[in-house]
Amino acid sequence: MYKFRLRPRLFEYEKKFAKSELKILFGNKEEIISVQNNYFEVDSEYCIPKKMLQKLTYFKEVVLPNGERLIPDIISWELSTYNNKRYSTRYSSHGIHEYKGKFNPQTVHSLINQFLNFETEDVKIYDPYAGSGTTLLEASLLGIDAFGTDVNPMAVLISKAKQDSMVCDLDKFNDVWDTCIAKANKEWKQIELGVSEREVYLQKWFPIDTLKKIETLKLQIEKEEEFRDILMVVISNILREYSYQEPGDLRIRRRKEIPDQIDIFDRISEDVNKYIERLKRFKNVYKGKFKKNSQIYFSNIEYKSQQKFDIAITSPPYATALPYIDTQRLSIVWTKRGKPSEIKELDASLTGSREATKLKLDKLRAEMIENQANLPKKTISLISNLESSLDLKNDGFRRKATPPLMYQYFKEMKKMFQNLKTNIKDGGYYLLVVGKNKTTLGGIEFVIDTPGLLGEVAESVGWQFIGVEELQTYKRYGINSKNAVNAEGLVVLKKI
């Protein structure tokens, strides 16, 4: 008899995923019995290899028929994060940066198990909206080849830093950091700020002494190619807190004063040292064979792979996406991933962007009325309903922009689905984790069923739409919580 002890406080979908993993391990041939909601029991003559059991996602413990107790790897990974019993999504290098819109690495871990049947050899995963590299890193930890694309340069940098963190010499990293911060402490008062577009822009958003310190530190870091990107990302994670950009707002809104806080050098040192210690704890428990993966700054609509992927796993933008560029614009400029004059264009280039000129919106509206993109019935019907519900007197510019921007979103997603078919093997799956969201037009609240609509759009270009699995999420708080729907959907597509 095998006994599988579930983690406490799992969502219903996580319990379902846990059971699905067991069905795959036992070839769907054995009865899985739930015991008081804490255990699954399987009476089987099969001898499941321990290396397979180690990959399980949602079980705290496995008791083998001979009484031996086994702890799945991911439990040890999580415990290394805080060195206590907390459920963690920041194990390994996942926690290097609080990038907005990240999805749960445990979800990725389980989807890999379920849809690749626990196989790690000779398989390849693609993430077309790779963001900060959650899918790529989770694949790396399992020893799987993976590749990603994204058109947010900051996201690509964060993803690279995660991968670099896992293969670097941490003792050397520590020594390099000590040298960099010591030199910066000595030299920052002597630095002269320039008059380039970048430096003038940053002077508007940071106190002079703060800017001198991070610029001096940047000069030291740039000399250390092996650790440069890792340090850039760790520092960029706290820049907003030390700037005049309001940290509590996803948009670029200016605050009058910066509250008292510890010196930025001290804060950065604290964060770097914590990160190094976390990585050391992780590497002490990690027994796998890490596969370094890569991500490039490229549009998934144009990307053509030389070899077919077995599966694609992603968390795409919502129909009205988070303002990723506004949120990270100080980091983008400071790390030289974009010029201040390029920010607006960069923001507009992202799928789901809410940035558009009146001229562009008028053009989109004309296309929308004729449905030139040939979007499927339910999708174009929703967009038409949004348009007809507008209150032209009371709805502001952003609300009036919602219908044409929604049209643009599904138009771009349709192109993505078309192109992705050329990069996936026949019979391969495409899994998208995306949430619903809300908007109010003309006083009417609309729930945008993005998962279901994406399934319909994908089906219209030849994908088999298997369905949507609801994924419960924790309640969202903060400035944008009023537009959130506390559930996401797993859209399951198959190439036929």
Image (cartoon, helix red, strand yellow):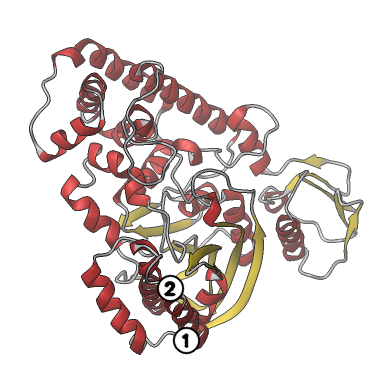
Residue 339 can be seen in this image: no
- Residue highlighted by disc 1: 376
Rounded to the nearest whole Å, what is the CA distance between mark 2 and mark 1?
Answer: 22 Å
Picture layout, residue 63 above or below residue 495: above
Extreme residue in the top direction: 186
Q: Amino acid type of disc 2? A: Leu
Picture layout, residue 115 above or below residue 35: below
Residue 275 image position (x, y, % from top left): 47, 28
> Please, what secondary structure does the residue beneath circle 1 have?
loop
Residue 81 image position (x, y, % from top left): 58, 32
* Residue at the (23%, 25%) spot, across then down: 211
Extreme residue in the left direction: 195
Q: In the rendered structure, are the residues bearing label 2 and label 1 in contact, judged by CB atoms less than 8 Å apart? A: no
Q: Amino acid type of disc 1? A: Pro
Along the viewing direction, whichever of 401 and 237 lies nearer the viewer: 401
* Residue at the (36%, 45%) spot, across then down: 327
**Mark 2 crowdedness (10 Å alpha carbons): few <14, some 14-19, many ≥20:** many
> Please, what secondary structure does the residue beneath circle 2 have?
loop
Q: Nearer the viewer, mark 2 or mark 1?
A: 2
* Residue at the (29%, 83%) spot, across then down: 366
Along the viewing direction, whichever of 178 and 358 lies nearer the viewer: 358
Q: Earlier in the sequence, mark 2 or mark 1?
A: 1
- Residue highlighted by disc 2: 390
Q: Is residue 246 left or right of residue 21?
A: left
Q: Is residue 266 left or right of residue 203?
A: right
**Mark 1 crowdedness (10 Å alpha carbons): few <14, some 14-19, many ≥20:** some
Residue 101 image position (x, y, % from top left): 47, 51
Picture layout, residue 147 above or below residue 367: above
Numbered badge on residue 336:
none
Residue 300 image position (x, y, % from top left): 35, 67
